[in-house]
Image (cartoon, coloured by chain):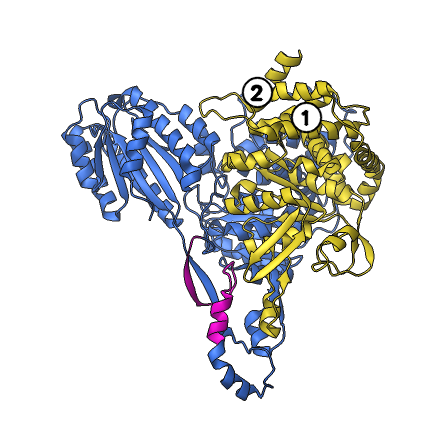
Chain colours: A yellow, B blue
Amino acid sequence: MARFPFSAIVGQDEMKQALLIAAVDPSVGGVMVFGDRGTGKSTAARALAGLLPPITAHQNCAYGGSKEDAERYPDVCGGGPLRKRPVPFVDLPLGATEDRVIGSLDLERALRSGEKGFEPGLLAKAHRGFLYIDEINLLEDHLVDLLLDVAASGENVVEREGLSVRHPARFVLIGSGNPEEGELRPQLLDRFGLSVEVRTPTDIETRVEIMRLVAANERDPQAFAAKWAGEDEKILKQIARGKKRLEKLEPGEDVLTDAAHLCLAVGADGLRGELTLMRAARALAALKGAKAVRREHLIAVAPSALRHRLRRDVLDETGSTVRITRAIDELFG
Amino acid sequence: MSGSAPDPLHDAIRAAQLFIQNPTLFGGMVLRGASPARDALVAAIGEALPTRRLPGHVDDERLLGGIDIAASLAAGKPIETAGLLAEAQGGVLVVPMAERLDEAVAGRLAQALDDRRVALVLLDDGIEPEDAPPAALTERLAFLCDLSQSREWRGVELGAKASGEAAPLSDDALGAIATTGAALGVPSLRPLIHAAEAARAHAALEGRKEVAKPDLEAAARLVIAPRATQLPPQEPPPEEEQEPPPPPPESSDTPDDTDMPSPEQLEEMLVEAAAASIPRDLLEQLVNGKTPKRGASGTGQKRKAGLRGKPLGARAGMPRGGARLALIDTLRAAVPWQGVRRRERDADPDAPILMRKEDLRIRRYEEKAARVTIFAVDASGSAAAARLAEAKGAVELMLAQAYVTRSEVALIAFRGENADLLLPPTRSLTRARRALAELPGGGGTPLAMGLNAARELARSVTGKGRTPSLIVLTDGRANLDAGGQPGRKQAGEDAEVAAKAIAREGYDALVVDISARPGREGQELAANMQARYLALPRADAKALHSAISTNMREPA
């Protein structure tokens, strides 16, 4: 199916914002999307990947390695001339085995020629792109552990079956899931940078709008893509500008204090919350072309950056989002 | 379409006719309930479209293609095989016993559906409402047809494909579909998109260029109604103040019957048509105020292939379906034969090791089956409301631990004339909390009914490869029999029968006597169930939880 243009996605502003932040600054960590089926979670993630400009990679490199990668990991990159290729988007299927994910002994080579070789897995494929996991809460815990580990370190280290391989694997991890069907361990959740909640739009008008757009895309994908190309281009430029601006932005003392106060007020565990909050606010400021990171940026990203880090009280029905907005209102009026 | 309901086969045939117009767009069909009519329908689809059958135990290699190890070893060079997905490209995969479909396979199929590579026909032979194909798939297929009530027996002709194409739907028509979805509680957008396309396909079949009322009705009936989670509000659905977008310009240039009524009328009629065609069993559940769980929760950690756990050593076998090659053992198996094989093949002495299929060894792991703790809670008047609070607390504490022990929790409450499964096996705190909040109390004690419900659940849990543990919280004083009729004597006898049935199946069980003065009844019940007995006249949730933890066996 043809990719749906990112700019044609109706509503879902929080998810779009989180994805754009991750695109500008992958170091915020992955994005976790909670929501029901059929709310356009994977459509948005896919659309963003399709939007990004192609990467330059060595032609024979199974990892899509850049020039720098080839220098850092000379023994795994296949080399070859530098060629453009689209930003990878890997859709991790439910029930993928560890072998498929991290890579494994190349059986064919081992059996045929007795050579020990490494067959790259999905992590290698996702390098410099996106790794999307639908229903991540149903994935085996040890696999989620592994994924988050690699996502954080940017490197996949394989030590098994007599293999010893290190290869680059920097990607934006996007997980999605429906909390009704089993939850993610809090420890794992905490390691996602941002988390957003998507709901299916309930007003009829929006739903009609979505149905109309999807039908139009269905009938003539090319024409539809052409129609939205201008808008998509704008977003693309915004991301590129944001990336450049990011280095120049350094949050001031006042914003840092705000962040600390907010985390304290909502009882977000650990330092990771503060760190992510700052990074996300900075990325948003860069995205918006602001001259400095301001409180408004902080407030805009606070729910996404903190809602999954609040200590949970089994008996407290109040949603995390409500608790955060309440704290924001109290602190900053 | 009200009045005497036509046989469900009619709608299924209609759905199939729409489906074959554009298989990958619609994703496919779920055909529930085995019957000769269904076989005829599948055969008819097979005549219209290229179909392949997908065996339920298919592994990744067969599904996606790859190196055929056995053939490669025999030939001495790599031999690739195409996967079933590739072979069925653009056609239809028929999946028998779809309710038992492996999650991993379902994940692959869902991706293939999203990429429009194949369409699926899921044959669902499930009997219980919870026995349903994975929701990740049913969500992506346009047509859900329940043929279990079908009494017809005849050959099926689907007819030809439509020659023309209908124009896209007007905003009013889309709005009517969206309203229908909202009225029947269908949150996902996929069914609405499918319904819109179904209406177009229906119009094309009827030879219309524009979508008309009967097309929309058919779409509502075939796509939206089977997914209803609520009945439409009694009042005509609240008009979400639709600021009239450019008033319907396409006035009647189509003849009489297919005239488009005003947007409001259209919405109303569509909601009615959809509501009238909600399948009967679904309707019953809705009327009883239950949210149908069809397929919604079929996605738990059902089964884990032998991929983890304590290593057990290797055995001969093919490294497929996730099983991993035990390299050292494979080599060890191959080495003694090298001399013979070299002579046989005339290989030169420097040739690499000669492998054969029978050398391959795969790793085995011993894995603990996940445990499902089933609470059967006496919520009758005699068991006092305070008990319920304790049971609730204990369930929540068990759930909080579920991550550590990888166990799940289920809850059955029995009171009055019912034994209800309030919480199907789950690890989800969100769901558990909601189910517990809704737990009512009061009424008689249908102990036999509660025990039977617990036993049935335990059996279905076992069927899914997990280990059930039963925890019955009651005072043991039954006063309603297995049919829900009052009468202490019959009730006692029925409870004894039910308890002994549990003992026969050999489930790990614990009876927690929660009466204020623990007595003979509880102990007898435990004895009949061959369960351990625990008297907890004054327990709080924590005490109950710790008592349960120390009293239950470790999962086998």
Range of residues picked out in magenta: B309-334
Label at residue A301? 1
Residue A162 falls within the magenta-colored stretch: no
Q: Please tell me how crowded label 2 is: few (under 14), some (14-19), or many (20+) other residues with Cα within 10 Å.
A: many
Q: Is residue B332 above or below residue B273?
A: below
Dividing the picture into quadrants, the one containing residue A328 is top right
Q: Earlier in the sequence, mark 1 or mark 2?
A: 2
Q: Is residue B24 above or below residue A279?
A: below
* Amino acid of disc 2: Val
Please state which of residues A167 and A322 is positioned toward the viewer in this rendering.
Answer: A167
Please state which of residues B46 and A275 is positioned toward the viewer in this rendering.
Answer: A275
Q: Is residue B31 above or below residue B220?
A: below
Q: Chain of mark 2?
A: A
Q: Please tell me how crowded label 1 is: few (under 14), some (14-19), or many (20+) other residues with Cα within 10 Å.
A: many
Q: Chain of mark 1?
A: A
Q: Residue at x 72, y 23 (%)?
A: A297
Which residue carries the number 2 mark?
A266
Q: Residue at x 65, y 30 (%)?
A: A276
* Amino acid of disc 1: Val
Q: Position of residue A101 (x, y in %)?
A: 59, 52
Task: State whether residue B40 appears in this view.
Answer: yes
Q: Position of residue B419 (x, y in %)?
A: 32, 32
Task: State whether residue B155 appears in this view.
Answer: no
Q: Position of residue B311 (x, y in %)?
A: 42, 58
Q: Are marks 1 and 2 on the same chain?
A: yes
- At numbered mark 2, what does the secondary structure look like: helix, strand or loop? helix
Residue B332 falls within the magenta-colored stretch: yes
